[in-house]
Image (cartoon, rainbow, N blue to C red):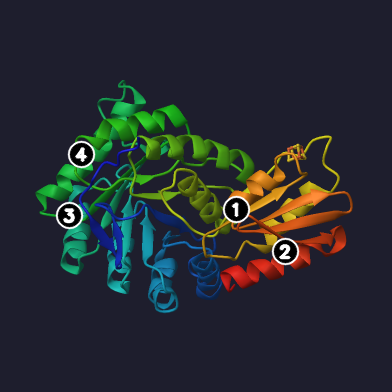
Amino acid sequence: MMQRRISQQISVGGVLIGGDSPVVVQSMAKTFTSDVKATVAQIKELEECGCEIVRVAVPDAEAAGALGAIKKNISIPLIADIHFDHRLALAALEAGVDGLRLNPGNIRDREHIKRVVLSARERNVPIRVGVNSGSLPPAPDGGLPIVERMVGAAMQEIRLLEALDFSLVKVSLKAFDVPTTIEAYRAIADKIPYPLHLGITEAGTPQRGSIRSAVGVGTMLYMGLGDTIRISLTGHPREEVVVAYEILKSLALRDRGPTMVSCPTCGRCQVDLVELAQEVERRMATVGRPIKVAVMGCGVNGPGEAKDADIGIVGGKGKGAIFLKGKLLRTVPEEDLIETFMSEVQKLTGQ
Ligand code: SF4
């Protein structure tokens, strides 16, 4: 039985993270932040598919200068991702961002960190201590195992923040290697009360990256760790949000949009089920209301699975049966199956 680690709750622009809040889904815009129009458009797309907090890269003054305008035009909290230059963090705070992500490996001057922390404290803006295995500070403990180095880097930064009376903290310890990531999070979980932001960094292209992330993030969630997640994929960030929800739904931690049951097909299948299932998934991508959908190839397991779903299709020869809440609604020719099915979905969801 999964038991969640209860962390100290923080609010990022009104979205609660930690405590008994549901695990929050984040993503990151992939536009040039200085291009306000493109960035706002992408964030709006992310909002539509359920992204709850968005991060943007702030690599230069131009990007920092765009943050105010971006913030004004979006509805979800905005986090500025800062590396190297503490002045960009100060500018982001002045622009009104809801959170900062600082990489302890990339801003090392304690005086600079102090100035950022004091400004964040004044504004009640949380900071994520975001450790990446690829950019650890060159410590004298360079010979230590990677997990210890990651945890050590995070702890050093956390103690610095605590010394400045700052506790609006969340922590991430990301690596590409899944066991390393899991061990790092496990090692820090008992040492600190702060919420954990989970992810497998640079996980890869959507197919392979989703699998790596599902194994890594899914394992940690099942261990009870994690208050917010971001799935890093080499692709449109919309896919990150979809995968994040699929992971959370698989563990019954969140409920959003369609949950699809579809059979793998076999020699008994007499409809083009692959095409049918993909079309149903594509058409339902914008449905936000939780709904269980079954797309089954034949009458062997089909009616049974379709019975448990809110709505289901069971394929037959040149036709298909549509089930609604376990009851046969009607049988329609294969060519009308999708349209009839989608109009029933619309009636059910209002979307
Ligand atoms: S539901 Fe029918 S078509 Fe699909 S895998 Fe089972 S037996 Fe094969």
Residue 330, can we see it?
yes
Query: Is the residue marked by circle 4 packed among few (<14), some (14-19), or many (20+) residues within 10 Å?
Result: few
Q: Are marks 2 and 1 in contact (CB under 8 Å)?
A: no
Label 1 sits on what residue type? Ala
Q: Amino acid at mark 4?
A: Gln
- Depicted 272 relative to depicted 279: above or below: above
Describe the element under mark 2 as helix, strand or loop: helix
Q: Which residue is disc 4 drawn over?
A: 156
Q: Quadrant of residue 78?
A: bottom left
* Quadrant of the image containing the C terminus: bottom right
Q: Nearer the viewer, residue 73 or 11?
A: 11
Q: CA distance from mark 2 to mark 1?
A: 13 Å
Mark 1: few/some/many CA within 10 Å (<14, 14-19, 20+): many
Three-letter code, disc 3: Lys
Query: Can residue 138 be seen in the rendering of this structure?
Result: no
Q: Which mark is residue 341?
A: 2
The x, y position of residue 208, in whole percent, is 61, 38
Mark found first going from the N terminus, 1 or 3: 3
Asked if ligand 1 lies within 8 A of label 2, the reply is no
Instruction: Give the mark, 2 or 3, whose residue is nearer the N terminus.
Output: 3
Identified at 33% across, 28% down, the residue is 147
Q: Quadrant of residue 65?
A: bottom left
Mark in the foreground, 1 or 4: 1
* Amino acid, disc 2: Phe
Tag 3's secondary structure? helix
Image x and y of residue 260, in percent: 61, 51
Upstream in the sequence, badge 4 or badge 3? Answer: 3
